[in-house]
């Protein structure tokens, strides 16, 4: 019997868990030709999520949970999930039922047909503000231009991954993770299916504007070095134009004996160059920061419990 793992990162999802579990059990009962595992990654929740997971585990041995020692963010929670899945394939989904479990039936069909990575593509984006939708579209456009790999717009983390995709993803252990880019990076045979994304049923989205902005910067700096190239090109362009500008003044002074107007031109050029320099420094800093984080060689996350077992004693 093939085993399917449902991998669900949860962060303060106490309110969602009972109805989520109900829907998952419906899915499991419909597909009893598979063995199932429901793997929750508790990403350092500070409400009753852990107790709730514990109770689910007591009642149903198909439920497994990993408890991270603090909140590491969804991207890292997913990596922890890949480390602990036991299934022949693994379905990554959100806890808030924005990813309808009903779609998994279709994913399983494609999996049986031999696809390795079946991703769900949103036809709409649920209830999102106009600004957020615009910004997210612009972000994907920029990202697509900058990185050589195709990162698909309107595709989230909701997908079915064959075991070999999971094994490949386990090897990608960078700290600043942009998992959407990683899914594309590993390649394999992909298939998209469309669905309508609903709204979160309970609780609230934990993505603030700044968290999203951070994710966007991470997305760009982790999948592309184009910003460094842009800084270089800007530098060359500015130096070149200032050189032309200098020649222009030289000629003007020699031919017409004009006094070059000083203050306004100077201040404009200084501010302009200062801006470009700060921007370029920031870009370089972004990458150096990433190098710094990776060279420390820390583990990406710390798991403190697996089901009833306390982890962390056998490391020395
Ligand atoms: N999540 C997590 N760690 C976090 C934030 C979120 O594990 O730090 C989980 C959350 O419990 C949910 C999923 O990631 O299962 C998606 O979160 P959310 O619904 O807040 O994101 P959105 O749907 O707005 O993208
Ligand atoms: Mg959500």
Image (cartoon, rainbow, N blue to C red):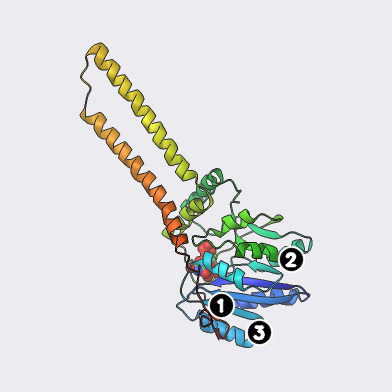
- Res 280 seen here: yes
* Residue 46, quarter of the rendered image: bottom left
Label 1 or label 2, whichever lies nearer to me, is: 1
Q: Secondary structure at mark 2?
A: helix
Q: Is residue 249 above or below residue 112?
A: above
| Label of residue 61 in the image | 3
> N-terminal of the two: label 3 or label 2?
3
Image position, residue 284 (x, y; %): 41, 48
Image position, residue 156 (x, y; %): 59, 59
Label 3 or label 1, whichever lies nearer to me, is: 1
The residue positioned 25% from the left and 31% from the top of the image is 266
**Image quarter hosting the N terminus:** bottom right
Please state if 245 lies on the left or on the right of 66 as rendered.
Answer: left
Whether tag 3 and tag 2 are in contact, CB under 8 A, the answer is no
Residue under pointer 2: 108
Residue under pointer 1: 66
Disc 1 to disc 2, C-alpha distance: 25 Å
């Amino acid at each position: 019997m093939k085993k399917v793992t449902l991998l669900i990162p949860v962060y303060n999802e106490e309110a969602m868990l009972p109805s989520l579990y109900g829907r998952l059990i419906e899915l499991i009962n419909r597909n009893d030709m598979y063995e199932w595992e429901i793997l929750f990654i508790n990403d350092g929740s500070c409400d009753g999520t852990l107790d709730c997971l514990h109770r689910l585990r007591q009642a149903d041995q198909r439920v497994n949970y990993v408890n991270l020692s603090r909140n590491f963010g969804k991207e890292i929670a997913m990596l922890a999930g890949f480390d602990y899945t036991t299934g022949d394939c693994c379905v990554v989904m959100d806890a808030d039922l924005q990813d309808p479990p009903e779609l998994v039936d279709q994913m399983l069909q494609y999996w049986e047909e031999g696809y390795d990575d079946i991703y769900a593509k949103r036809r709409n984006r649920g209830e999102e503000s106009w600004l957020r939708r615009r910004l997210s579209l612009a972000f994907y456009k920029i990202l697509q231009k900058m990185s050589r790999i195709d990162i698909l717009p309107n595709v989230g983390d909701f997908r079915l991954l064959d075991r070999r995709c999971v094994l490949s993803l386990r090897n990608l252990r960078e700290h600043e993770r942009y998992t959407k880019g990683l899914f594309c990076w590993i390649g394999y045979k992909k298939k998209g299916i469309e669905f309508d994304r609903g709204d979160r049923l309970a609780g609230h989205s934990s993505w603030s504007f700044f968290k999203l902005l951070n994710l966007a910067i991470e997305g760009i700096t982790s999948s592309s070095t184009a910003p460094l190239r842009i800084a270089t090109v800007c530098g060359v362009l500015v130096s070149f134009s200032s050189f032309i500008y200098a020649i222009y003044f030289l000629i003007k002074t020699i031919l017409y004996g004009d006094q070059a107007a000083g203050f306004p031109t100077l201040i404009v050029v200084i501010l302009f160059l200062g801006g470009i320099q700060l921007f370029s420094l920031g870009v370089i800093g972004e990458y150096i920061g990433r190098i710094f984080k990776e060279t420390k060689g820390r583990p990406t996350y710390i798991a403190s419990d697996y089901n009833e077992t306390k982890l962390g004693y056998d490391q020395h």
